[in-house]
Amino acid sequence: MAAFRRLAETTTLFGTVHSAPQKETSPSPTNHIARRGYHIDLGAREKALLEEDPALKKFKSYKNNLKRVSKIGDVLTIVVVAACAYELYAVATVRKE
């Protein structure tokens, strides 16, 4: 079983061999901190960018329209599926008679 697992790990779909398996080393504390990063408070520029811009408020009105169009699309999809199912049922019952 171990040989099969090693074979599966070292080969790809096309049968080529990968490079040698990497050594499993325990992560040193400095690597862990470097990957995670330190918590730094936002600066004045970042805070200004995150504030709400009154000039952009007129562009946020599309959300309600988008929800309405999405609901209409969902209803139309259900109606079309129901109509197709009814037609299939009607054709099947006509053929039986």
Image (cartoon, rainbow, N blue to C red):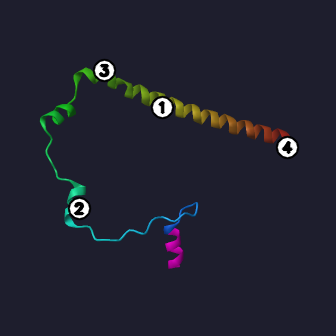
Q: Are marks 3 and 4 in contact (CB under 8 Å)?
A: no
Q: Are marks 1 and 2 in contact (CB under 8 Å)?
A: no
What x and y, as percent, mark residue 79?
61, 33
What amino acid is labelled 4 in the image? Lys
Where residue 32 is drawn, which disc sits there? 2
What x and y, as percent, mark residue 9?
49, 68
First in sequence, mark 3 or 1: give its number: 3
Q: Helix, strand, or loop for circle 1?
A: helix
| Eye-nearest disc, 3 or 1 | 3
Pick the quarter of the image with the C terminus.
top right
Q: Is residue 7 magenta?
A: yes
* Residue at the image point whose x is 17% and y is 53% from the top: 38
Q: Are marks 1 and 4 in contact (CB under 8 Å)?
A: no
First in sequence, mark 3 or 4: give its number: 3
First in sequence, mark 1 or 2: give its number: 2
* Cα distance between the residues tagged 3 and 1: 21 Å
- 40 and 60: which is toward the camera: 40
Q: Are marks 3 and 1 in contact (CB under 8 Å)?
A: no
Q: Is residue 26 left or right of residue 10?
A: left
* Residues rendered magenta in the picture: 1-8
What x and y, as percent, mark residue 8?
52, 69
What amino acid is labelled 3 in the image? Lys
Where residue 96 is drawn, which disc sits there? 4
